[in-house]
């Protein structure tokens, strides 16, 4: 959802119903899939945070399955990046130490006989698409506001001491 982040409803001066309208539907019961044990730690934490967030009140089964699929993609992307970084470090070590040795000397010192291959980095466009799709699930405040959804903290209603005293007085008067 590109564009400017709208104001919160309580920040809007003109609050006519025509400007504040919403589409309505029926929420069906959902059964969120369990996170996979082999996911990247970041994907696990993000997926767990969905269950603790207010926006999932509007999620249906398809939203949960999309989130699940995105966590699979995010895990793959992060692991591919980590592998590429590790392979470059191994190659740098090999180049600085083992390159000047004979193949037998390399092997004796625990290096591979041949220069190690370097893994490719994952596509940055894939990560961009993952983030865009996560945005379509309204996981950030800005995404929710663009969709005209506002999550508010529950406010505990506490009666003022005067109201409690007046209610007690009314009961006593009625009781006679």
Image (tube, helix red, strand yellow):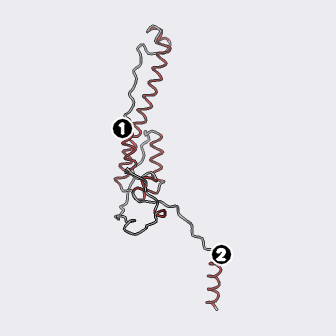
Mark 2 or 1, nearer chain start: 1
| Residue at the limit of the structure toward the front, as seen here | 13
Query: Could you say where residue 175 lies in the image, as x and y percent from the top left?
Result: 63, 90
Q: Is residue 167 left or right of residue 116?
A: right
Q: Is residue 80 above or below residue 104?
A: below
Return the residue at label 2: 161
Q: CA distance from mark 2 to mark 1?
A: 59 Å
Determine whether the residue tagged by mark 1 lies in a helix, strand or loop: helix
Numbered mark located on residue 77 in the image: none
Residue at 42%, 34% in the rendered image: 79
Q: Is residue 124 above or below residue 30?
A: above
Q: Residues within 10 Å of mark 2 (few under 14, many from 20)?
A: few
Image quarter of the C terminus: bottom right
Q: Is residue 155 above or below residue 50?
A: below
- Write down the quadrant of residue 6 in the picture: bottom left
Determine whether the residue tagged by mark 2 lies in a helix, strand or loop: helix
- Write down the quadrant of residue 150 in the picture: bottom left
Q: Is residue 171 above or below residue 121?
A: below
Query: Could you say where residue 60 lies in the image, as x and y percent from the top left?
Result: 36, 56
Q: State the residue in front, 131 or 3.
A: 3
Query: Could you say where residue 81 lies in the image, as x and y percent from the top left?
Result: 42, 32
Return the residue at label 1: 125
- Residues at marks 2 and 1 touching, judged by CB atoms closer than 8 Å: no
Q: State the residue in front, 155 or 142.
A: 142
Q: State the residue in front, 154 or 41.
A: 154
């Amino acid at each position: 959802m590109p564009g400017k982040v709208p104001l919160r409803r309580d920040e809007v001066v003109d609050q006519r119903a025509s400007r504040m309208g919403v589409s309505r539907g029926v929420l069906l019961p959902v059964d969120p899939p369990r996170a996979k044990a082999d996911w990247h730690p970041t994907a696990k934490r993000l997926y767990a945070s969905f269950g603790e967030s207010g926006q999932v009140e509007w999620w249906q089964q398809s939203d949960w399955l999309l989130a699940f699929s995105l966590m699979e993609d995010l895990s793959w992307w992060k692991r591919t990046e980590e592998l590429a970084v590790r392979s470059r470090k191994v190659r740098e070590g090999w180049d600085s130490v083992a390159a000047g040795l004979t193949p037998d000397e390399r092997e004796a010192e625990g290096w591979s006989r041949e220069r190690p291959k370097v893994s490719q980095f994952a596509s940055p466009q894939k990560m961009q698409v993952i983030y865009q799709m996560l945005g379509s699930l309204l996981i950030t405040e800005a995404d929710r506001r663009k969709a005209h959804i506002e999550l508010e903290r529950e406010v505990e209603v506490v009666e003022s001491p005067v109201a409690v005293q007046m209610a007690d007085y009314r009961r006593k008067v009625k009781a006679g």
